[in-house]
Image (cartoon, helix red, strand yellow):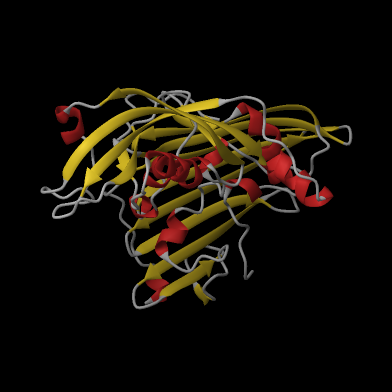
Amino acid sequence: MNKLVKFAIATLLTTVMAIGFAACGNSGNVDTFAGAISEESYDSQESAVEAFLENEISGDAVQAELQGIEEVGELSDKEVAALDTGDTIAADDTIVSAKVVEVSYTRTTSSAMSLAAKTGEEEEAEDDVFVFTVYVIEITPAGTTVREFRYYIPKAENGDVLTRSYFEDVLDPAKYVNCTQKYTAKSTTMGMSMNTEYTILCANDKATLEMRVPNVSSSVSGIYGYFEDGESFKAWISLDGVTYEETSVGSFSGVTDMEGFATLCIPDFDYSYFEKTSYGFKIQESFLETYVGKVLGYYGGTGLKAELKFYVKDGRLSEMKSNLSVTIDGVKSTSTESVKFSHFGTTVVNRPESIG
């Protein structure tokens, strides 16, 4: 066997029923993302806001178009000092103002963009107007009279669409290179059930995979992988967990480094599909059908029920879990799927003895 099934969420089980993600509760969830300032500066408040929409809101699912800007307040000196600006604002720069701004925008969804691409006709944005609150900071860099503007994304409120900065902060691959991941899935089609389990251990420069999946004879097969990331990334495979043979790099879902391996279980969907919640984030209701279509590669299902949620604790994913039910060509399929993340910073991996 020279290639494992890719276990990003969208392609895990059969071609009839690949899955997505909903979550069960987790107490004590904590977001560590306090906000982010734009890397670039702009020559006006409006251009900073337009850049915010382009960089932080527009994505694979939507394209945002500015409709209006309304100043609704101004940060105090104490509030400005509390912002996480890193070294973007130097100590001797002058902050002229820090406005609280409500940005109104409309959006064109991916389904409309796809239709426009196929028909050659321009699709109008959705009629609904969305509002997101950001800060616009006006700065005079030290030793100049130039005024520049930067947007600052405050800590997200429940119900806000996700920004790129929040999403990338939570899913930063470096946060997952030392942890334990437990994946479980169950799917049922025409009364027949299939269970799948994976366990991934990542310990910075070493990792293991233990996968138990049903095979064509309805029994369970074990597949084991061992990985090292040193001068080069190497992978070994075993069918008994004892004797390992080196396999080509990339044979495990195209993974070529430890960060890629550590994030295999994280779905390959960008921030624009999701919205903030009290426990983390979830897919927006308006994109569930698009999401399932991408997962299944088929848009003709009926009776669709789906959830996709991500729980966040201490600024990292603690659990993902999904439920999905859909009928395709008269055949009903259901599935549940879960990934739990644990033992951050304390996971240990030992090199199998047979590798030497």
Q: Residue at x 34, y 78 (%)?
A: 231
Judged left or right of residue 105, residue 296 is right
**Image x and y of residue 349, in percent:** 34, 59
Is residue 343 visible in the rendered structure shown here?
A: no
Taking 11 as reference, is 311 above or below it? above
Q: How many marks?
A: 0
Quarter of the image where one finds residue 341: top left
Q: Residue at x 23, y 44 (%)?
A: 139
The N terminus sits in image quarter: bottom right
**Image x and y of residue 228, in percent:** 39, 69
Quarter of the image where one finds residue 164: top left
Taking 257 as reference, is 101 above or below it? above
Q: Nearer the viewer, residue 294 or 157?
A: 157
Q: Residue at x 43, y 46 (%)?
A: 181
Q: Residue at x 36, y 67 (%)?
A: 351
Is residue 185 visible in the rendered structure shown here?
A: yes
The C terminus sits in image quarter: bottom left
Q: Nearer the viewer, residue 17 or 69?
A: 69
**Image x and y of residue 126, in percent:** 67, 30
Quarter of the image where one finds residue 254: bottom right
